[in-house]
Image (cartoon, rainbow, N blue to C red):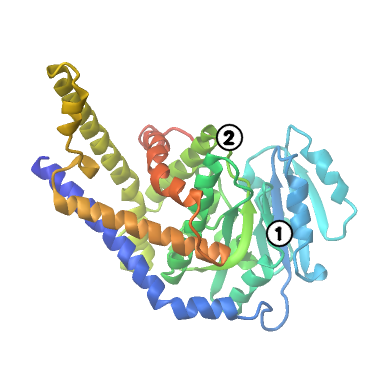
Amino acid sequence: MNGIEDAAIYALLFVSLYFEVFLLFTFLENRGRLKFQEREKENPAGGFPSATIIVPCWNEENTVEATVESLLNLDYPKDKLKIFVVDDGSADGTWGKIQRFKGDDQIKIFHKENGGKHTAVNLGIENAETEFVGCLDADSFVDPKALKRIMRYFEDPETMAVTPALKVYKSGNLVEMIQNMEYKMSIFMRKMFSFLDALQVTPGPFSIFRKKVFNELGPYKHAYNTEDLEYALRMQSKHYKIENAHDAFVYTVAPATFKGLYRQRVRWITGFLKNAVDYRFMFLKKEYGNLGILILPLAFVSVFSALFFVGRIALTTAAYAVEKISLLSAVNFDFGFALSGLNFDWFFVNTGAVWMLSVFVLIMTAVFIAFGKKMADGKFTLSRDFFYYLFLYGLIAPFWLIKSIYNLFFAKKALWR
């Protein structure tokens, strides 16, 4: 390992471990607030405010009915809740499916030419007359208590938006189980970011806003097919407060195949990188708090550093394999002798400190997964998806990281599907 590579590995591992320890201390410092929020009454002071939930849909004939039904089943006063279903020029049977809700007083149906999700949501916002407005993707389903639990955060007049806790709906195969644990860890991470006032995305599934936010900051825009990320950055750049309701659960249908997961993550990561470039003026600026000083720069750099580690390990593994194959050939494939000479070293480096730092990073990641699982399920138990995520996610993530970096440097678009 040369000096520059050595320094880079130490620096990246140190920053990763520092960030994880920082989040751990954030959790320990805010345990009291977390428990208080869990005990807090579900009804907001002064009664229930009016809200409109927009369901943008494009070719969602298989799930849109269940999505709307979940909204109708919300534990929330019917006279305070409006539901807008916006068909964004679907080419399948979506429009026919939503006709069954046409006579419901709570629901209003819109149809428009295809223009992208952001245009469908904007149409709903333009027609909303309630104090609060939110969106629910047509492949997601809300817990009956989710809206009540979100609304309690708006008792603080400075809170302009509240994000939910996302969980995977029915994880069955390996790809879905990996995502299941990833989403649960994200529940913990987003809550910590909320404590740091550093949330950088308001997810499409059931983020709720004060309507005046859109009046003041304008509508959604295309934003590289990640409009929910861009809008959160727009809000943060204007110092609008975003909270997270870690117990307001929303269930979303996750990609069931590696191909589907790959395309989704390429879109997400490409969108993040391009939006981060657009909002680079926030990087390392004290006026943007923890988001500008810590979260955004580290998130941006982590995409490149992850590929650096993967490349380093892959190259060293290849060299290791060539060396051992040469050894076997030299001894006429005497496997007993060859295996006795193997000296496997985790992460394929000859430095004890690097190995120790790497182990600590892995342990901290496991701890965060455990915290997230407890927050999502109420308890932590070891399961297959825990180990699948911990040991397999790092093997598949480089595929979409490489493509996303390619899209950034060569100005390529990431397709929605």
Residue 96 sits in quarter: top right
253 vs 322, left or right, is: right
100 vs 391, left or right, is: right
Residue 87 visible from this viewpoint: yes
Tell me residue 268's x, y (percent). 48, 44
Residue at left 17%, top 33%?
Answer: 340
Amino acid, disc 1:
Ile
Local SS, label 2: loop
Mark drawn on residue 417: 2
Is the residue 340 above or below the residue 218 in the image? above
The one of 399 and 394 positioned closer to us in this rendering = 394
Amino acid, disc 2:
Arg
The one of 110 and 219 positioned closer to us in this rendering = 110
For the residues carrying marks 1 and 2, which lies nearer the camera in this image?
Answer: 2
Residue at left 40%, top 50%?
Answer: 276
The one of 29 and 276 positioned closer to us in this rendering = 29
Tell me residue 319's x, y (percent). 19, 29
Tell me residue 223's x, y (percent). 51, 46
Residue 53 sits in quarter: bottom right
Crowding near the residue tagged with mark 1, few <14, some 14–19, many ≥20 C-alpha atoms within 10 Å? many
Crowding near the residue tagged with mark 2, few <14, some 14–19, many ≥20 C-alpha atoms within 10 Å? few
The answer to whether mark 1 and mark 2 are in CB contact below 8 A is no
Disc 1 target residue = 53
Local SS, label 1: strand
Residue at the far bottom in the pictured view: 46
Residue at left 62%, top 69%?
Answer: 150
How far apart are labels 1 and 2 at the CA level?
A: 24 Å
Residue at left 48%, top 79%?
Answer: 33
